[in-house]
Amino acid sequence: MKIKYKNTVDDLIELNFYLNTKLKNRRIKNYFLKYGYMLIILLISIWYFKYNYEDKYIFLIIVTILCLLWLVLLPIIVKMELRHRLKDKDSNNKYLYSETILKLKNDKIVILKNDNKSELSFKDISNIIIYKKRIFIFKENFNIFAIVPVKVFLNDSEKNKFLNTIKGNLC
């Protein structure tokens, strides 16, 4: 089986979001970023209530709305920041966004990109994940080997054949 595709900035952003939810050291940082600021706002509101009892319900409603806005807007802000960083930093990186050819052979996966050849034996694959219309193929220790967009497959049966070929050969 042979697949041709090009990775985009969005593929790298979704990989980053997936790793942020799965890796423990990144997850702790995300919890602090997500909930730490809300804790600071709540502590300030408690301090405010200690000295001012007049408009506490209005202030509590405003604080709750700010916390909910933070939870909703944080992923959007992070995506925009990542997109901006990746476009600035890697816009000239021809290797990262060039056309990739992925071939499934009897005992390995071969990736051809810009006259470079990478091989990965099926027994060295630690995990294969479908996440937000992308297939992530990981080597050991969550090292990414390939990001395959699901849209390169013509239909679900072709995608399932690809996944079953890999999963059938995993040890």
Image (tube, rainbow, N blue to C red):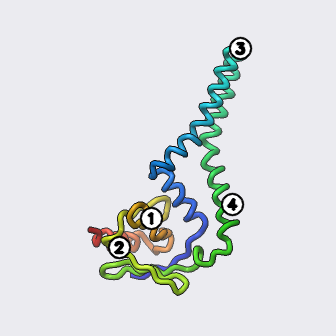
Residue 77 in the image, given as x and y percentages of width and height = 66, 50
In which image quadrant can residue 8 be found?
bottom right
Quadrant where the N terminus sits is bottom left
Where 160 sits versus 72, above or below?
A: below
Q: Nearer the viewer, residue 45 or 29?
A: 29
Residue type indicated by callout 3: Tyr
- In this rendering, position of residue 139 left or right of residue 95: left
Residue that label 2 marks: 161
At x 58% / y 74%, what residue is drawn? 96
Residue type indicated by callout 2: Lys
Residue that label 4 marks: 84
Residue type indicated by callout 4: His
- Determine the CA span between mark 2 and mark 4: 36 Å
Residue that label 1 marks: 143
**Earlier along the polypeptide chain: callout 3 or callout 2?**
3
Q: Nearer the viewer, residue 127 or 73?
A: 127
**Earlier along the polypeptide chain: callout 3 or callout 4?**
3
Q: Nearer the viewer, mark 3 or mark 2?
A: 3
Residue type indicated by callout 1: Asn
- Determine the CA span between mark 1 and mark 2: 24 Å
**Earlier along the polypeptide chain: callout 1 or callout 3?**
3
Q: Which disc number belongs to residue 155?
A: none
